[in-house]
Amino acid sequence: SKPHPSSSSSSRARRRAPPAMASTTQEEKKVLDLGVFGAPAHGLVANPSPFCVKLELYCKAAGVPYGKPELKPGDMGPRGKLPYATFAATGEVVPDSAAIIDKLNALGYALDAGLTEAERVQARLIAALCEDSLYFVTLYLVWQRAENWPLTKAEYFAGVPWLLRGMISRGARKGVLSALKGQGCGRRPAEEAVALGTQAVDDLAALLGEKKTFFGTPKLTTADVIVFAQLDHLLYGGLPYNPLADHIRTKTNLVAFLDGIAATHFPDVAKARVAAAKGARE
């Protein structure tokens, strides 16, 4: 389970700004800088990477003052993958969203302190469903399907200089496709891969039920953050081939869950979606 904040950490937590003030201002002492991809040009999702969304949403929900500097082309952190974070107090650079969140928990920025042990177990199972199963279906759709690749290339590599963009994007895609084949999802026919994703969506919808959050809490927990990060781009990313988006739309509780979080924590994204929907009707 996640580490509990110490009493001194709890005192710091009480003095922190509330979640609505999570973005860094001059009055706040920044805890960390996020190394994440930039938002896509269409503005309908916060980030093309589920794990970058996970990290930023966790910071927003937990009230972590953070910065989000523009990365230099090719800056992919110490492991060659985003996200990563640079902690302001020590200068420590930490890769991997889970490791960064563990460190934030140790600093007292915990979302799951009120969960029971049984709920913590369920939260880990939700995380495994999303990040060890559904995520690979997402990778299949985003990176392997030829009709989706032009959009993926534009979203992930827009900041790479034009002369290098083709070589770097091809190399990155080759690496992802190799990982997908090693994991197994990349070897499946389309209908099998989609079936796996469909079952995961069904399971998440059943677990959420009529609640506004997965454990009925007034504030988000880590499980809510992870589910949003994995589903939001699937629904709103605009992939040309994406049967999972159509399936998610049939789950009105999940759509309301996603839209509610976007409206609260990514209001510019929510406004862009309203404008896009209005434009599509006209």
Image: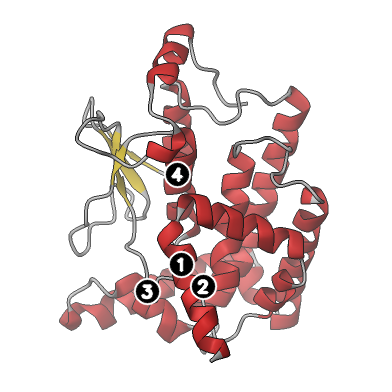
| Residue named by callout 4 | 97
Task: State if disc 3 and disc 4 touch (CB < 8 Å).
Answer: no
Which residue shows up at 45% across the image and 83% down it?
149
Quadrant containing the N terminus in the rendered view: top right
Three-letter code for the amino acid on which mark 1 is drawn: Lys
| Residue named by callout 1 | 271
Between discs 4 and 2, the one toward the N terminus: 4
Q: CA distance from mark 1 to mark 2?
A: 5 Å
| Residue named by callout 3 | 155
Count of marks, rendered view: 4
Between discs 2 and 3, the one toward the N terminus: 3
Which residue shows up at 22% across the image and 72% down it?
160
In this view, 210 is above or below 175: above
Task: State if disc 2 and disc 1 touch (CB < 8 Å).
Answer: yes
Select label 2 or label 3 by which is in front: 2
Q: CA distance from mark 1 to mark 3?
A: 20 Å
Task: State if disc 4 and disc 1 touch (CB < 8 Å).
Answer: no
Left or right: residue 45 compared with residue 24: right
In this view, 74 is above or below 243: above
Q: Indicate the secondary structure of the residue bearing disc 4.
A: helix
- Tell me where residue 41 sits by quadrant: bottom left
Q: Residues within 10 Å of mark 1 (few under 14, many from 20)?
A: some
| Residue named by callout 2 | 274
Between discs 1 and 4, the one toward the N terminus: 4
